Amino acid sequence: MPSEPNVVVLGCGMGGFTLSNLVSKRVGNSAVVTIVEPRSRLPFAPAFQWLVFGWRQPEKIQRAPTSLVKRKNVRMVSDRVEKIDVNERTVKTQSQTIRYDKLVISLGTEFAFDQVPGLETYSHNAYSIEGALKLRGAIDNFDGGSIAIGISRLPIKCPPAPYELALLLEEHFRRAKKEAEIHFFTPEPHPVPAAGSVIGKQVERLLNSRGIKYLSKWGGEGSCYLQVAKSESAFLKGAFLSNPPRLEFHPPRRKWFLEKLRLEKEWLKL
């Protein structure tokens, strides 16, 4: 165990990497930054959409955090987190127990496919390398027809992503001279609510100008889909869309071991 104060960062994705980089520069020799991350190569998540259209290959959007790990005050633990003990101020991994002075949880979320029946079986997503490559295959085999893009529950990871994908799909099929009728369903009041209503209206006008059928405020209390089947999608408002390929932005849930922290709300307060 390091004798200096130990700042433990769980996860080295976009958030964890950025924070570890900034903290290690700030603390210098006065503390150690310990990063717990099981992956040896880290994907650049904004490039997942590029995988979908064949603009990049998986090996080109993954890199090892070499420059960060080489710093004298950075310690990388290649392991998975199993338990956090806030009373003892420890993190248990599969191979060791790490004591922390400061703890940063940047583990992202897990997809809660089970919250919408049929979602995992009959839909696609572009939130992982595997998902992007599977979607690429579906696009290559698409001969024309309807496509349903849906935000199934709120909140979602990277709120602009589904809008970017909708516009890229429209352009892709237009250039390929394939007939594609794109439907976009969301429980949001307007596109990318975090950006404000002005930006949201601009994005909505852009969708409409591309012929994308945008339907907001579907469902209630942050939900849109009731179920997804092979031949149709059922929505909480009673509408059905038959025979569409589906591109879903799945409901997330926090990591399972965080449930034992007895948090008052579903998401960690930042």
Image (cartoon, rainbow, N blue to C red):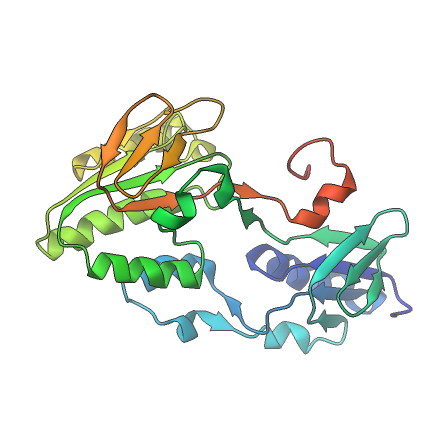
Q: In the figure, residue 262 lies in which quadrant?
A: top right
- Residue 227 placed where, x, y %? 39, 34
Q: Is residue 248 above or below residue 20?
A: above
| Quadrant assignment, res 34 | bottom right
Left or right: 250, with 85 as reference point: left
Q: Which residue is painted at 27% across and 62% down in the image?
A: 137
Q: Is residue 47 left or right of residue 263?
A: left
Where is residue 147? Give x, y as percent.
23, 43
Q: Is residue 40 above or below residue 184?
A: below
Where is 17 relative to 268, above or below? below
Residue nearest the viewer, comparing 229 with 268: 229
Q: Nearer the viewer, residue 42 or 183?
A: 183
Residue at the spot x=71%, y=46% of the render? 258
Residue 190 in which image quadrant: top left
Q: Quadrant of the C terminus?
A: top right
Residue 94 is situated, as x and y percent measured from the top left of the image, at 75, 66
